[in-house]
Amino acid sequence: MKPSKLREISETCTCFNLRKTTRAVTALFDEALNPIGLRATQLTLLAILSRTDNWTVTRLSQTLVMDRTTLTRNLKPMQEQGWVLIRKGEDRRTRTLALSSKGRRLLEKAVPLWDKAQKEVMQRLGNVRWSSLMHHLKVTSSLMSPY
């Protein structure tokens, strides 16, 4: 393998650079949410679940472009904390998801902490770069999503 190709991979790999950026941004949000014992990934799940009680594991995994088993593994500690309710659906193979009242209370505490972290990201990037980033991320995820 040519060293130049390996350098190209380490410097220009789309996946690597997206994951590196995601880890940096996630760390900022995790730090902001730490006082209430919540992680950024959990906040996103709570926020999405708060929108409706009609989520199935399959529908949510497709919305998040996440493998069902990974989603289930992420939901398990949230269910154990009493933030998320997982019930059997109409079909034995289907499970429905809902935000519990405890999850709603936690979400209310999380919003001001999220707001502060979100404003910090926007300040660091500037409004134009942040808006452009949001646009390009939405386009990229829609083009890359298998759903």
Image (cartoon, rainbow, N blue to C red):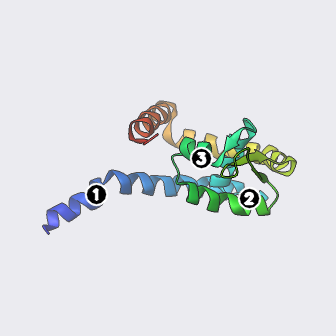
Asked which secondary structure carries label 2, the reply is helix
Q: Do the residues labelled 3 and 2 touch (CB within 8 Å)?
A: no
- Residue labelled with disc 2: 78
Left or right of 16 in this view: 75: right
Asked which secondary structure carries label 3, the reply is helix
Q: Can you tell which quarter of the image residue 111 is in?
A: top right
Tell which circle, 1 or 2, labels the residue nearer the N-terminal end.
1
- Residue labelled with disc 1: 11
Front residue of 72 and 30: 72
Q: Which amino acid does label 3 sit on?
A: Thr
How packed mark 3 is, by other alpha carbons closer than 10 Å (few <14, some 14-19, many 20 or more), is some
Front residue of 6 and 115: 6
Q: What residue type is labelled 2?
A: Met
Q: Which amino acid does label 1 sit on?
A: Glu
Residue at image position (22%, 62%) is 7
Mark 1 or 3, which is nearer the eye? 3
Front residue of 113 and 144: 144
* Placement of the N terminus among the 4 image quadrants: bottom left
Residue 8 % position (x, y)? 22, 58
How packed mark 1 is, by other alpha carbons closer than 10 Å (few <14, some 14-19, many 20 or more), is few
Front residue of 15 and 36: 15
Left or right of 97 in this view: 121: left
Residue at image position (43%, 57%) is 20
Residue 104 % position (x, y)? 82, 45
- Residue labelled with disc 3: 58
Tell which circle, 3 or 2, labels the residue nearer the N-terminal end.
3
